[in-house]
Image (tube, grey):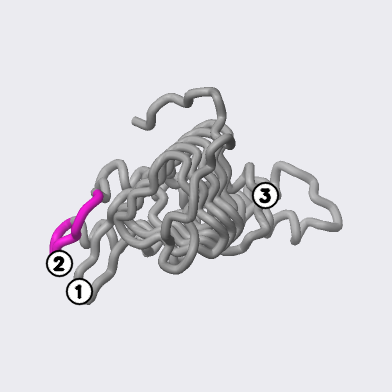
Amino acid sequence: MVLLACAGTGAVLTAVVFDRLVTLGDFRGVVLVAVAIVALYLYAILIFRLFLRAFPLRAGEIAEGSQQEFVYHVYVLFFLMLFYSIMRSGFMPAPLMRLFYLAIGARLGANTYTQGIIHDPRFVEIGDNSVVGQYALLILHVIEGRRLAHYPIRIGHNVTIGAGATVLAGVVVGDGAIVSTGAVVTKETLIGDGEIWGGIPARLLGRTSGLLPSRESPPLT
């Protein structure tokens, strides 16, 4: 909470300074609120990244009472208090959502965009020219009883994740694959290059033969 309070204080001070430097006229109140909100998120993202640089949250199981459990509790607080409101809103255009996810740790390739919700984005890697559809869910954590863990999701180049699809922890999606609308891809599923998966739970439906791009994308690192 102290870290979030620092972000809030910075946002208020930014709005005060902005008010003194700029003549705002009749819309002063609206503009100051907007400036404060934008500043709050910018400061929160900066503090979030500095915290994770000092105390990295690692993939794998989190032991009870460990330092990693403390780091996770601080980490998830940023999402509960601030970040989820952006991720779930659906009002931000795709280019801004791309910047937002990059800012909080996602690894997105060139020309890759998402209008979905990526839980724990620091553990996701998506290649070039891929799309995650509206309200698709990428869930990288596992909570089973008292067990908590994070497992990366790797999505290749030229992949389409359909609107409303759910991709669970540990999934690997090959280049040129398609996950159809509303599908649920269960934990640690391996989807091969050019495969089409759909259903609940998702299963192989076919291949995208003839749809794959001729250009070879560089391998994910």
Do residues under tags 1 and 2 come within 8 Å of each other at their CB atoms? yes
| Front residue (pair 55, 26) | 55
x%, y% of residue 38? 61, 51
Residue 52 circle label: none
Q: Is residue 118 visible?
A: no
- Measured in 3D between alpha carbons, the distance from the residue under mark 1 to the one under mark 3, in whole angstroms, is 37 Å
Q: Nearer the viewer, mark 1 or mark 2?
A: 1
x%, y% of residue 105? 41, 44
Amino acid beneath label 2: Glu
Can you say whether 50 is above or below 133 in the image? above
Residue farthest right in this picture: 26
Quickly name the residue at label 3: 93
Quickly name the residue at label 2: 64
Give the class, few, some or many, for how many residues have Cα within 10 Å of label 1's Cα (few <14, many ≥20).
few
Name the residue: 70% across, 47% down.
Answer: 20
Q: Quadrant of the C terminus?
A: top left
Can you say whether 122 is above or below 84 in the image? above
**Residue 199, magenta (yes or no):** no
Give the class, few, some or many, for how many residues have Cα within 10 Å of label 3's Cα (few <14, many ≥20).
few
Q: Is residue 184 left or right of residue 135?
A: left
Q: For numbered disc 2, what is the local secondary structure? A: loop
| Front residue (pair 83, 41) | 83
Range of magenta residues: 59-67
Q: Is residue 43 left or right of residue 124?
A: right
| Front residue (pair 116, 37) | 116
Give the class, few, some or many, for how many residues have Cα within 10 Å of label 2's Cα (few <14, many ≥20).
few
Q: For numbered disc 1, what is the local secondary structure? A: loop
Name the residue: 44% across, 64% down.
Answer: 184
- Closer to the N terminus: mark 1 or mark 2? 2
Q: Nearer the viewer, mark 2 or mark 3?
A: 3
